Image: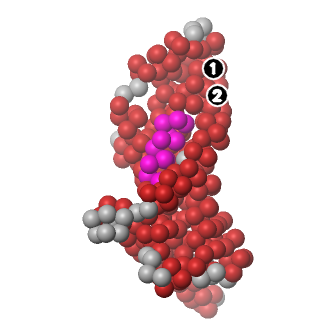
Amino acid sequence: MIDVGLRLLNRLGRRTVMAIDALGYAAGLLGEAMAFVITGRRRGQPVRLQAVVEQMRQVGVDAIPIVLLLSLTVGLMLAIQFIATLREFGAQTQVVLAVAKSVTREFGVLITGILVAGRSGSAFAARIGSMSVSQEVDALGVMGIDPVRYLVAPALLAMLIMLPVLTILADAAAILGAALYSAPMLDMSVQTYLTQTLAQLTPRDVYEGLAKSVVFALLITVIGVATGFSVTGGAEGVGRATTRAVVLSITALIVADMVFSFFLNR
């Protein structure tokens, strides 16, 4: 019994040390990438604009259709649930406010973050993991090219730009979806519904979602690239790293969203 307990403690200790080491490595990557983004041009090592534009296309533009479709569906779902629930209290007219606040503060940015984590976070891990396994990352260092500047900084900058943009589009699509269902149920036009939504939203509602999107962008990027750089074990290792990047990213997003909600709505 004592031996079993010692083995469990030993395993827990190793896992804790590995987790702390991984956090430190990820923080170092993030700090180095941010340094290139902010001061790279002044130091004569600017982030490549062409790489940033390409990453913006992959991260943002290519994700627009699926983000709009799922956000529209989420808006419809919220409207259905809110009207059914508020009708029990005779307050179904409050669905406009309920949907507007929940979409801009929570659901829009969270749905967008999860989608981008599944698409781009996994892509970062797979791309860098494949390069690590094939020793292309080491080759960059031999050629005098900083791998963080070449691989991480463009992805980080593109994510910081495109995730807030996708969040705004997701908010708009979700509110439109809610309007398409709610307006006939409330005996009003879609235009009237949208006008009431704009009247009841405050800048803080939008800013809260955008602030979350910036934090989500940092988390998705750093988890994806850190997981990719740490790949071992060939092609099988790349597959494991890709799965791990998605799971860790989504977990981090949900925990970060909870922390945001706790402190911003007290």
Quadrant the C terminus occupies: top left
Give yes or no for residue 159 being in the magenta stretch: yes
Q: Main secondary structure of the magenta part?
A: helix
Which residue is found at the position 61% from the left and 26% from the top? 177
Q: Which mark is residue 50?
A: none
Quadrant location of the N terminus in the rendered image: bottom right
In-image side of 236 versus 109 (left or right):
right
Q: 151 and 74: which one is in front?
A: 151
- Which residues are the magenta region? 158-170
- Classify 96 as above or below 55: above
Which label's residue is closer to the chain start, 2 or 1?
A: 2
Residue of label 1: 180
Which is nearer the eye, 163 or 175?
A: 163
Residue type highlighted by circle 2: Leu
Local crowd size for mark 1, using a 10 Å CA cut-off: few (<14), some (14–19), many (≥20) = many
Q: Are marks 2 and 1 in contact (CB under 8 Å)?
A: yes
x then y, percent, for residue 42: 27, 65
Q: Residues within 10 Å of mark 2 (few under 14, many from 20)?
A: many
- Residue pointed to by mark 2: 76
Number of numbered discs present?
2
Outermost residue toward the bottom in this view: 3
Element carrying mark 1:
helix
User: SS class of the residue under badge 2?
Assistant: helix
Q: CA distance from mark 2 to mark 1?
A: 8 Å
Q: Quadrant of residue 208?
A: top left
